[in-house]
Image (spheres, rainbow, N blue to C red):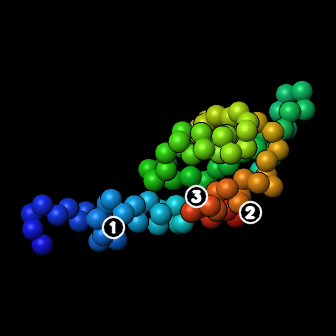
């Protein structure tokens, strides 16, 4: 190994492969639930993120785009406008997350 090679990742593989990010996502146990807000509006809440391993703004943007809805990141959780509890777990699974109860 030369001095040029940087093997600083947890898995021992180069950071460019993104293995550590995938492992970090798989270890997180997320929950998806629906809340009713003012005027009876539904909001889908996704929480349980380890914010040191996930860019919540980027993930929220991807979910909003795929669901064609608005939303925000608030206090370490993603809030999406509308009831999307049926679709969000599958979308998170595609991103490498595990969704539990």
Q: Residues within 10 Å of mark 3 (few under 14, many from 20)?
A: some
Q: Secondary structure at mark 3?
A: loop
| Residue 20: quarter of image | bottom left
Decide if residue 78 is in sight here: no
Q: Residues within 10 Å of mark 1 (few under 14, many from 20)?
A: few
Q: Residues within 10 Å of mark 2 (few under 14, many from 20)?
A: few
Decide if residue 5 is in sight here: yes
**Residue position for label 2:** 101
Task: Please say if the residues under marks 1 and 3 sit with CB atoms less than 8 Å apart.
Answer: no
**CA–CA distance in space, label 3 to label 2:** 18 Å
For this orientation, the residue located farthest to the left is 3
**Residue position for label 3:** 95
**CA–CA distance in space, label 1 to label 3:** 20 Å
Please state the horizontal and vertical placement of residue 26, each as a whole percent of the image.
54, 66
| N-terminal-most mark, 3 or 2 | 3
- Residue 85 horizontal side relative to residue 78, left or right: right
| Residue 8: quarter of image | bottom left
Please state the horizontal and vertical placement of residue 101, each as a whole percent of the image.
74, 62
**Residue position for label 1:** 10
| Residue 65: quarter of image | top right
Please state the horizontal and vertical placement of residue 60, each as a whole percent of the image.
60, 42
């Amino acid at each position: 190994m030369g001095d040029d090679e940087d093997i600083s990742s947890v898995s021992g593989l180069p950071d460019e492969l993104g293995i550590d990010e995938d492992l970090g996502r798989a270890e997180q146990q997320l929950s998806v639930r629906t809340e009713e807000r003012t005027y009876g509006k539904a909001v889908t809440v996704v929480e349980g993120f380890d914010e040191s391993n996930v860019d919540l703004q980027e993930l929220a943007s991807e979910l909003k785009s795929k669901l064609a809805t608005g939303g925000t990141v608030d206090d370490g959780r993603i809030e999406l406008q509308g009831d999307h509890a049926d679709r969000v777990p599958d979308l998170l699974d595609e991103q490498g997350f595990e969704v539990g109860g």
